[in-house]
C-alpha cells in the first residue's frame, strides 16, 4: 500500500477558525433553510384520469386523456389528478399546471413512448446552456404549487431508444456551447430533430413550492429529475433504477431552498449534482446561484454520490449534506469539479457523517476538469468535510487540485477513516487546508523501541 498514513497536517497551521460552524450553528442554518421551504398548497379537488378516457393495461395511447384531465383541473383552479393502478402507455409528454398534484397509485406504471415527434420543443437547458429542445417526459414551466406523489413508477424507455442518441449528440452539444460563448439569442437556439439531444425524464423550470415524493424512476433518457431556476422544493422518498448514459438522479441548476431526504439512489451517473449554468451564460446569471440546499438521510449508489459542477458558473454556496450511506462501488464519493472555462465559485459546503463501501476516489476537488478551458478560474473555498468512513479506496483517498494563481482555500478535513487505500493524498495549489484525524490504513499505536539500549546514557 502506498502512502499508508495516519495523520496529515498540511501547512504549518493549527486547526484554524475560517468560518466553520459549531454543531448548534450548523443545525440552526439547516433549520432556517428547511423552515423557509414551502410545500405546495393544492385545492381539495380530485379527478381520475380514467374519467377522461385513459385505458390502463392496454397498448392504447392515454396521452390525450392526461391532457384533458389536466385541462379540466386547471379550469377548476387546480387539484389532484389521480392515476389508478395499472400500466399506461403515454406517447408524448405530460405538461403540468400550477396548483396541481399528479398522484400515481402504488401499482401505476407510466410507460412513455419513444417517438421524438411526439415531444414538442420547449424551453429547457442542456448541460448548462439554455435552449429549445424536445420536451422532457414530465415538464412544467412558470408554475407554483406543483406536486408529484404516490408510489407508482415512471419508465422513460431510455435503454430501448434514447440511449442510441448518445453516440450522435456531439455536433449539437458543441453547437450549443458555441451559442453559449457567442451569446446567441435564446430564440435562435433551436435544436430538436437532427440534434440528438436527449430529453430529461422530469423537469420543472422557473417554478416554486414543489413536492416530488415517493415515486419510482426507471430507465430515463437523460437526467432523471432536473430543477432549473426553481425555488422552494422538497424531494423525498424517491427511488431509482436508471442506468443509461448521463442518468443523474437529481440535478439542481440555478435553484435555491431545496430539501433532499430519504432517497434511495441507484442510477448510472451522479446521485445528486448541484449546478449553476455553464461558462459565459452562467457567469451572466451570477445573481441566481444554486444555494441553500440540504441533503440528508439518503442511500447512495451510482457513479458518484454527491457532486458540485462541472457547470457551476453562477456559483454554488451554502450546501449541507448529512447522514448518508453508500452501498456497492462508486467511482467517486464526494466530487467537486470545475475548470477555467467556468468561473464562478464553490463555497460554504458542509458534508457530515457519510459512509462508503468502496470507491475509486473518496474526496476529489479539481479546478481543471477534463483539462480544458482558460481565462476564468473558479474560486473554491470554505469546504468542511467531517466524519467520513470508507472501507476501501482503489485510487486516492483525498485529491485537491487548485491553480497557483487561484488556490483552493480554507478546506477542513476532520475525522476521516479509510480502512484500505492504494494512494493516500494529492493536495496541490492550496491555502489553509487543515487535516485533523485523517487515518488511512491501520491506525498507528505507541511506537516501538529500536532496541533495549537505545536512548540510555
Image: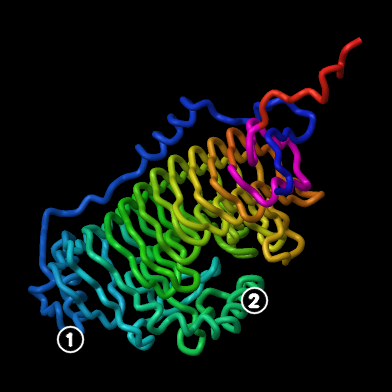
Q: Using a 10 Å C-alpha cutoff, classify the residue at mark 1 as few (fewer than 14 neighbours), some (14 to 19) or many (20 or more).
A: few
On residue 60, which mark appears?
Answer: 1
Q: Nearer the viewer, residue 235 or 120?
A: 235
Asked whether disc 1 touches disc 2, contact meaning CB atoms under 8 Å apart, the reply is: no
**Residue occupying the point 42% across, 81% down:** 162
Q: Secondary structure at mark 1?
A: loop
Quadrant in which the C terminus appears: top right
Q: Which image quarter: residue 279?
A: bottom right
Image height of 197 relative to 218, above or below: below
Image height of 180 relative to 236, above or below: below
Residue farthest to the left, as pictured: 51
In magenta, the rendered stretch is: 419-443
Image location (x, y in percent) of residue 176: 58, 76
Image location (x, y in percent) of residue 347: 60, 44
> Along the horizontal axis of the image, is 62 left or right of 452?
left
Q: Is residue 323 magenta?
A: no
Q: Nearer the viewer, residue 297 or 445?
A: 445
Image location (x, y in percent) of residue 394: 62, 55
On residue 264, which mark appears?
Answer: none
> Along the horizontal axis of the image, is 88 left or right of 158?
left
Q: Using a 10 Å C-alpha cutoff, classify the residue at mark 2 as few (fewer than 14 neighbours), some (14 to 19) or many (20 or more).
A: few
On residue 178, which mark appears?
Answer: 2
**Residue occupying the point 27% across, 60% down:** 215
Q: Which image quarter: residue 446?
A: top right
User: Mark 2 or mark 1, which is nearer the start of the sequence?
Assistant: 1
Amino acid at each position: 500500500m502506498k502512502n499508508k498514513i495516519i495523520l496529515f497536517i498540511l501547512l504549518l497551521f493549527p486547526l484554524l477558525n475560517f468560518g466553520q460552524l459549531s454543531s448548534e450553528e450548523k443545525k440552526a442554518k439547516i433549520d432556517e433553510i428547511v423552515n423557509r421551504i414551502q410545500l405546495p398548497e393544492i385545492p381539495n379537488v380530485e379527478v381520475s384520469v380514467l374519467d377522461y378516457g385513459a385505458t390502463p393495461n392496454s397498448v392504447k395511447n392515454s396521452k390525450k386523456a392526461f391532457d384533458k384531465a389536466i385541462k379540466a383541473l386547471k379550469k377548476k383552479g387546480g387539484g389532484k389528478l389521480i392515476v389508478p393502478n395499472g400500466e399506461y402507455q403515454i406517447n408524448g409528454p405530460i405538461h403540468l399546471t400550477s396548483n396541481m398534484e399528479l398522484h400515481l397509485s402504488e401499482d401505476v406504471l407510466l410507460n412513455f413512448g419513444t417517438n421524438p415527434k411526439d415531444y414538442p420543443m420547449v424551453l429547457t437547458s442542456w448541460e448548462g446552456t439554455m435552449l429549445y429542445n424536445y420536451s422532457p417526459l414530465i415538464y412544467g414551466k412558470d408554475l407554483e404549487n406543483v406536486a408529484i406523489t404516490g408510489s407508482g413508477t415512471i419508465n422513460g424507455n431510455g435503454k430501448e431508444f434514447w440511449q442510441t442518441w448518445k453516440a450522435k449528440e456531439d455536433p449539437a452539444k458543441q453547437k450549443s456551447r458555441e451559442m453559449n460563448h457567442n451569446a446567441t439569442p435564446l430564440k435562435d437556439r433551436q435544436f430538436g430533430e437532427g440534434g440528438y439531444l436527449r430529453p430529461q425524464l422530469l423537469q420543472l423550470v422557473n417554478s416554486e413550492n414543489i413536492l416530488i415524493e415517493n415515486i419510482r424512476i426507471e430507465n430515463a433518457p437523460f437526467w432523471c429529475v432536473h430543477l432549473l431556476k426553481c425555488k422552494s422544493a422538497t424531494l423525498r422518498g424517491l427511488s431509482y433504477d436508471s442506468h443509461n448514459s448521463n442518468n443523474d438522479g437529481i440535478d439542481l441548476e440555478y435553484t435555491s431552498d431545496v430539501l433532499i431526504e430519504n432517497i434511495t439512489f441507484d442510477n448510472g451517473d451522479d446521485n445528486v449534482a448541484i449546478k449553476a449554468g455553464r461558462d459565459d451564460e452562467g457567469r451572466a446569471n451570477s445573481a441566481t446561484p444554486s444555494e441553500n440546499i440540504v441533503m440528508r438521510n439518503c442511500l447512495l449508489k451510482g457513479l458518484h454520490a454527491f457532486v458540485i459542477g462541472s457547470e457551476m458558473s453562477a456559483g454554488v454556496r451554502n450546501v449541507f449534506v448529512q447522514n448518508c450511506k453508500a452501498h456497492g462501488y462508486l467511482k467517486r464519493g464526494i466530487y467537486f469539479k470545475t475548470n477555467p472555462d467556468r468561473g464562478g465559485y464553490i463555497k460554504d459546503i458542509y458534508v457530515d457523517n457519510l459512509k462508503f463501501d468502496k470507491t475509486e476516489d473518496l474526496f476529489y476537488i479539481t479546478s481543471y476538469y477534463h483539462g480544458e478551458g482558460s481565462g476564468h478560474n473558479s474560486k473554491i473555498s470554505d469546504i468542511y468535510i467531517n466524519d467520513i468512513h470508507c472501507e476501501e479506496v482503489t485510487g486516492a483517498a483525498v485529491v485537491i487540485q487548485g491553480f497557483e494563481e487561484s488556490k483552493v482555500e480554507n478546506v477542513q478535513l476532520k475525522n476521516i477513516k479509510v480502512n484500505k487505500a492504494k494512494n493516500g493524498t494529492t493536495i496541490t495549489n492550496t491555502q489553509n487546508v487543515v487535516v485533523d484525524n485523517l487515518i488511512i490504513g491501520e491506525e498507528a499505536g505507541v511506537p516501538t523501541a529500536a532496541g533495549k539500549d537505545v536512548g540510555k546514557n
